[in-house]
Structures are given as C-alpha cells and as structure tokens.
Image (cartoon, rainbow, N blue to C red):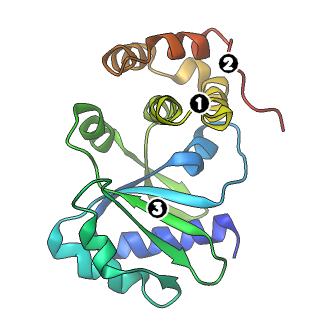
Amino acid sequence: MNESELLVDCLRRLNRTNVIYYLTGSMASNYWGVPRTTHDLDFVVQLPMSAVSRIVQEFSGEFYIDESAVRAAYKPPHQFNAIDTRSSLKVDFWLPKPEAFDREMLKRRIQVTLFGEPAWIATAEDVVLHKLIWNKISPSQRQLGDAAGVVAVQAAALDKNYLKHWAQELHLADELDQLLSGKIKPKQT
C-alpha cells in the first residue's frame, strides 16, 4: 500500500465515523504546493469522547490502534496514531488546541476530492502558517520547502491579508516575508 492508497483508505474510514476532521501536514502541502514523498499522514480530528470507540473500531483490523492511547490524547500532546499493518506507514491524529489559530484552521477547512474521495483539508494559507509554526518548533528545511512550495504554486490565489494577520499574531512575520519575497525556495525535485 502506497501513501495515496493509504490516504484514500483513511478518508473512507474517517468519513464513515462522521467526526469533524481535516488533512494537514505534508499531504496537505502536496495538494496545494510542490509534492514530495512522505511517510505519514496527519489529520486533525475534533473527537468527542463519545466518538472514541467509533474511531477505534473503524481503524481496527488493518491498523494497529490503541484505545487507551486515543483516550490519552485529551491530555498533552493531544495526539494519537494508527499504524497501517500492510505498509507500516503511520497516521497521526491531532486534537485541535484551544488557541485561536487552531480554531480558525478548523473553521476554515474546505472540502475537496482527493483520489476520488471526498476529503476535508486545511486551506493553503493555513498549511503555510502551520508549516512555519512547525519550523519554529523544530527547524527543518523540509517544513520551509513545503511552505515555499505552496506559496510558489498558489501565488496570486493566496489571501495575503489573512497570512499577514496570522503571521503577526503567531510571531512569524519575518518568516512569512521571506517566503512571500521568494527568499525561501521550494525544494527542487
């Protein structure tokens, strides 16, 4: 099973659970920007306690998922994962944080079709900002390259006012300026 097949499988499972979710991380930056290989999938899920058993049931079988780990996600770092036993690829699930930007990302998610499946995904602007946040937490040319790839592909379609507002709020204004001015380049494939 490759990354695209795993994504389709996960989307089908998530759509059956009726939980609110969106795709983020490198697969979202691949959608909006310059694609690259990745070894995991990242989803943000709004997971009420009443939906834990649905998620565990839906991802049981072909995935290794630990219900106690899912329940532990209500405490920091607010994350659990499922390992695809067919490919050993990892699927990370993050619960949204109560911060304003996380609430905004959830509110702004949009529905698209990925490989024939309906999917909720973070907007291009939110992917750029989220990549910059992750780069601040753990500096990486990969995060910056992903963000630059989205900026390069989406260019004029990006809501620059939204980007600048949140970059200021998140203390990422310098990094965003470097992206928008082309000083940070996408990875060349």
| Image position of 149 (left or right of 73) | right
Q: In the depicted view, which residue is nearer to us: 61 or 34? A: 61
Q: Secondary structure at mark 2?
A: loop
150 is higher (above) or lower (below) than 36: above
- Tell me which numbered mark, 3 or 2, is placed earlier along the sequence: 3
Q: In the depicted view, which residue is nearer to us: 140 or 127? A: 140
Which residue is the site of mark 3? 92
| Image position of 53 (left or right of 123) | left
Q: Residue at x 50, y 22 (%)?
A: 158
Q: CA distance from mark 3 to mark 1?
A: 20 Å
Numbered circle sitting on residue 25: none
Numbered circle sitting on residue 184: 2
Which quadrant is the C terminus positioned in? top right
- Which three-letter amino acid code belongs to the residue tagged 1? Ala
Q: Residue at x 25, y 82 (%)?
A: 53
| Count of numbered badges drawn on the protein | 3
91 is higher (above) or lower (below) than 141: below
Q: CA distance from mark 3 to mark 2?
A: 27 Å
